[in-house]
Image (spheres, rainbow, N blue to C red):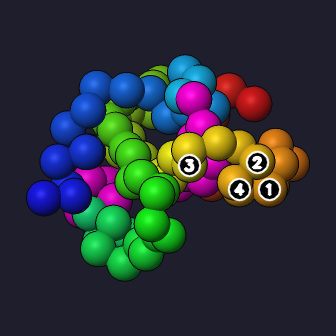
Amino acid sequence: MTHEILKNDHEVPSRRPLANAVNWSLFRRRQDAEDYLDHVRINDGYELIGGHSQDSVGDYWWVGVRVPSITDWGHTQAINKHGRHGD
């Protein structure tokens, strides 16, 4: 069920902002993103997010977390991005 988020046609949040996205990782193989998703645990009220897009290298998939408010996470300096683009 959670793998369905990888079908979303959405660039990684560092390229196309997504409100309250606070942590994400980028993968070049869908299977790697699915494996990662299977091991992510989040607090109640947080939401798993993700998507698929392409860049000059090729296809990528990303998995992240969205919180109700950035202050719930801490502050903007606590936002973690792995394999980010466009920063």
The magenta span reads: 19-33
Residue count near mark 3 (Cα–Cα under 10 Å), binned few <14, some 14–19, many ≥20: many
Q: Are marks 2 and 1 in contact (CB under 8 Å)?
A: yes
Estimate the x, y position of residue 84 in percent, counting from the top left. Answer: 63, 42
Residue count near mark 4 (Cα–Cα under 10 Å), binned few <14, some 14–19, many ≥20: some
Structural distance between the alpha carbons of marks 3 and 2: 9 Å
Displayed quadrant of residue 20: top right
Task: Give the residue pinned by disc 3.
Answer: 67
Task: Give the residue pinned by disc 4.
Answer: 73
Q: Amino acid at mark 4?
A: Trp
Task: Give the residue pinned by disc 1.
Answer: 74
Res. 27 in view: no
Q: Amino acid at mark 3?
A: Val
Q: Does dot 2 land on a helix, a strand or a loop?
A: helix
Res. 61 in view: yes
Q: Amino acid at mark 1?
A: Gly
Q: Amino acid at mark 2?
A: Thr
Q: Is 2 situated left or right of 63 in this image?
A: left
| Residue at image point 48% right, 56% down | 46
Structural distance between the alpha carbons of marks 2 and 1: 5 Å
Estimate the x, y position of residue 68 in percent, counting from the top left. Answer: 56, 44
